[in-house]
Image: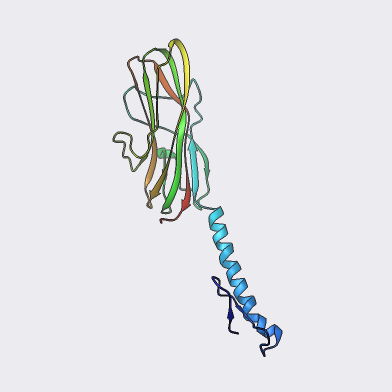
Amino acid sequence: MPGVTPNRSIRYPLYGEAALPPIAMEATAIDIDTAATTTDGLRAGALHKPRASILSTLGIGSGQAITKASITGLTFNQLNYDNTAAQNFADLGNNRLVCRTAGVYYITAGGTADFSGSMTTPCTLQIAISRNGNTSSLPDFQPHKYFTPDMTAGFLDISVSAWSFMVLAVNDLITANFFWNAANTPTLNFANAFLSATMLCTNP
């Protein structure tokens, strides 16, 4: 049976081959079954890549207190989801995610900066996704909002979020950190915090 398809190398009988049709097609059937099994495995892996999410149920008016001009690790109190076999991607007790499978990950973090009091001077808000406890100057990814509010007395809620593509090794630790600064000193609580990660592929 000299016929072989490109790429998959599936054997097939040629016209006029001496073997009986059932015998001639046996190798073809075996090769197709093998290829289908391989494809099924790849599809299952693509649909079930490691992903996890943790969040805080503390909402507006009751969020995590954040001190001005101080990098603060965000805290979480609820598992949103974790599809790893042992459900150990999410380390809720330590407010972090722990990589269990090396690869490229898409990671997001965010929530709501909940101000109360007086603030009429420019204010900077920063949120960062940090790896292995590195919080020096809010590394890795640090979008920020710089604005001048007009809040002489009252409340102001600002949504902030960050995202990053990261190449992670096994046991890399992922946390979310928040920083804010302004000349005024209103009260700021961080509400509805979340931290999520999804594996996109193995290391390139």
| Quarter of the rendering occupied by the C terminus | bottom left
On the image, which quarter does residue 34 sit in? bottom right
> Vertically, is 118 above or below 45?
above
Q: Residue furthest top?
A: 152
Vertical order, 71 against 150 (above or below): below
Q: Residue at x 70, y 83 (%)?
A: 22
Q: Position of residue 196 (x, y in %)?
A: 47, 40
- Residue at the image position 31 percent from the left and 24 percent from the top: 69
Q: Residue furthest front?
A: 15
Instruction: Name, please, the residue furthest toward the right.
Output: 21
- Residue 116: image x %, image y %? 44, 15
User: Taking 19 as reference, is 97 above or below it?
Assistant: above
Nearer to us in this view, 198 or 122 = 122
Q: Position of residue 121 (x, y in %)?
A: 36, 14
Q: Position of residue 156 (x, y in %)?
A: 47, 17
Instruction: Say which residue appears at 54% left-offset and 70% top-offset.
Output: 7
